[in-house]
Image (cartoon, rainbow, N blue to C red):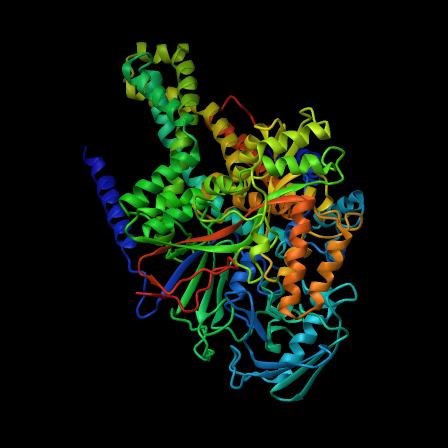
Amino acid sequence: MNARRPSCVMMAGLIALAAMLAAAPVRAGAETLLRTRLNADIRSTDPGTNRDANTDGVMAHLVEGLVAFRDDTSIGPMLADSWDVSNDGKTYTFHLRQGVKFHNGAVMTSADVVWSLKRWLDPATQWRCLSEFSASGIAQIEKIEAPDTQTVAITLDRATALFLPTLARPDCGQAAIIHHDSVGPDGKWIAPVGTGPFKLGDWKRGQYVDLVRFDGYVARSEPRSGNAGAKTADVDRVRFNIIPDSSAAKAGLLSGALDVVSNLSIPDLEDLKGRPDVQLSITPALGLTGILFQTRDPLLKDLRIRRAIALSLDTPEIVDAVMEGTARANNSALPIGSPFYGEAEAHGYTQNVAEAKKLLVQAGYHGQPIKMIANKRYSYVFDSAVLVQAMAQSVGINIEIEVLDWAAQLDRYNRGDYQSMAFTYSARLDPSLSFEMLTGPKATQPRKVWDNPEAQVMMQQSMMIDDKAKRQELFDEMHRRFIDDVPMVVLFNGSEIAGLRKNVKGYAGWLFAQPRFWGVSIR
Amino acid sequence: MLGYLTRRLAMTIPTLFLVAIAVFTLVRLIPGDPVQVMLGDNTDAAQAAQLRAQLGLDQPVPLQFLYWLGHLATGDLGHSITNNLPVLPLILERFQVSAVIVLVAVGLAACIAVVAGLIAAWKQNSALDLAIVGGATLLLSIPSFWLGLLLLLLFGLKLKWLPVIGYVPFSENFWQAAMFMLLPIATLTIVEIGVLTRMARAASIEVLRLEYVTHARAKGVPEWLVLGRHVLPNAFAPTWTLIGLVLGHLLGGIAVIETVFTLPGLGRLLVDSIFARDYPVVQGCLLFTAVIYVVVNLIVDLCYPLFDPRVAVA
């Protein structure tokens, strides 16, 4: 019996130690630490190059561009205080903010802007958005000049409405203005020396990324809006923990080991709703989920069958069931949150079972199977596919669901190798880009779902015109044709759901579903 | 001994070569393209082609294999497509995490299972035997992710004794690291106890029936001495073989446990790389796993004579 005593004592000691560690305060000394979660590690610290959505989200805290997207997806000033556009729409003259400091203490001048922009345009940088400034892109940059230390002039070969939105795109790294110390003498990337409210701290691959408050940051005077406006770091450090498993992340939030968990899945909502120590932030987002049809398929090339599927669906019911009230039905390519989403875009498909059956008879459809690819990476995509299958079955359409992993589905999507597919598109912040991701010639771009030459012309026009009313006309007309052609059935735009501990203040989601931790504090 | 070792090591070369071919081919057969995964749904054809060329993925597959094999011969497993890091250091870093969990858990499980198996065999067909066998079967049937989540909920959320997420290396802070490791180790230990107890019991029953055990008992040797000196060493040899197999299997990755407990181990690296179609890392992980398997089994074989003197290594 005596031999057992030491092990009991040890066990009691271990438990006591564990309890002490678990009860250890979040704040070490005076430091305030905000702990959040990424579902996968960032790819690099080089914005706009080797990147993904997680990388973009972290980098948005470290670097800034000349302009940035506001909450309503309009363009606002960031490092540029203002800009003038020449009468021919080709030359943009940016007037820089004074006294902006890089993380190394250097004051930003036009020379830094010119150096950064030229680096982006150097093919060796492998900038994701370089092709946008090639002959086949939105426009080519002919000149970048710095008439004085606070002014930069950029001349394009043609006018385009997409120049500023492209500079502001998060996946383009917001065309960040960085200090040349960010790269070594050989031009190789070291670490971002940007102008953001946070500096890069420790990056332990596979574990966490730490961002540290930049004390030399001077915030803009306008309120926070999207990636624009005032960005004040109200915590000393933000830790992005890499937690792939959503159950573990949820447990982390409930136990208090995490302060903010963004990108929560719909099934997590119910669990978190009644918790007294957790608050939820639900924001409409710009992503788009829908059912794609391969219009070159022997069966689905028949518009009547595609229309019959569209008319068999009760979209609001699907959205309510799948998104549990966090999103609204939308059949338009333009997201509901877009400033261009108007009365025309609100007109979509209304369930009409009789009409659907009639169309199927006219098309001579006799229950031939239609394969629909889906994935389980995004639960709402699979759930949507199941409901579409059930509703289509009620009019006699035989849909068979094939579940693939995301990479395999993406491969099939890019090759256009499918009959139909439940798919989700990432957010596009400009309405022209919302149509651009769908419209194009299938012969050269098999991933494009809508091959309508007239729509492609209208889409190109919308990229050139800056006049809002004229753009609205184009988008309205494109929407009408999109609904008529039924190349896909858009079901809904997603929503950004974040769970926060009750002591987190100032957190707000926005249309672009990326968490922002400037203006967020812990009390 | 040295000759045996040399022969065994020489035999691993063709094995690993075949594994290399199989791994490379299988990885390429998985549908999906790493470039598309990197670029997402906004893939520009020219950009994708440029990236593909930069990664060497535009070359014919046999050429890619020869290139990989050439580097492999010099110990270079290539660079990750996702983050451009050299694969071997990445694997070794992650392997340390998995190895600690697996070695401690299997060690603990073996200690408990061998004793439990011996007792169950000694009291064969009694209520105690039934309880041990039933318990082992139950533990064997519990999925590790479910058990892990239950422990997480109990000790992390309800009792708040242990941290729920995160990882601290032992080199940084021993006690904190131990706190983070307790639950994953406990989960794996509980599951492996089930596997090993059944084997230990079966082996002990066989030995208990042998004549020298009856002879020892007839001589009046105390029962604890019969079990400890005559039964245990002889019954342990088959269990030791199973421990080797279990170790080889688990050291290759405990992806589920690492995912549930957010540990940056080898299994999670492999799974993440498969989803990202990061070919060099997937190939590296699988090859490394094969090497570990071979090495662990070699060590088990070399240790076998310690438990069963009838087996000579030569």
Q: How many labels does the image show?
A: 0
Relative vertical location of residue A410 with respect to residue A344 in this rendering, above or below: above
For residue B135, say whether it is visible: yes
| Percent of width and height locating residue A481 | 69, 50
Residue at (48, 69) in percent of width and height: A225
| Percent of width and height locating residue A202 | 48, 64
| Percent of width and height locating residue B15 | 68, 34
| Percent of width and height locating residue A229 | 48, 73
Closer to us: B107 or B273? B273
Residue at (76, 67) in percent of width and height: A134
From the viewer's perspective, is A387 left or right of A484?
Answer: left
Relative vertical location of residue B171 with respect to residue A153 in this rendering, above or below: above
The quadrant in which the C terminus of chain B is found is: top right
Residue at (68, 55) in percent of width and height: A478
Closer to us: A98 or B127? A98
Closer to us: B305 or A502? A502
Relative vertical location of residue B202 with respect to residue B104 in this rendering, above or below: above
The quadrant in which the N terminus of chain B is found is: top right
- List the single residue furthest toward the bottom: A148
- List the single residue furthest toward the left: A2
For residue B77, say whether it is visible: no
State the image quarter where residue B218 is shown. Answer: top left
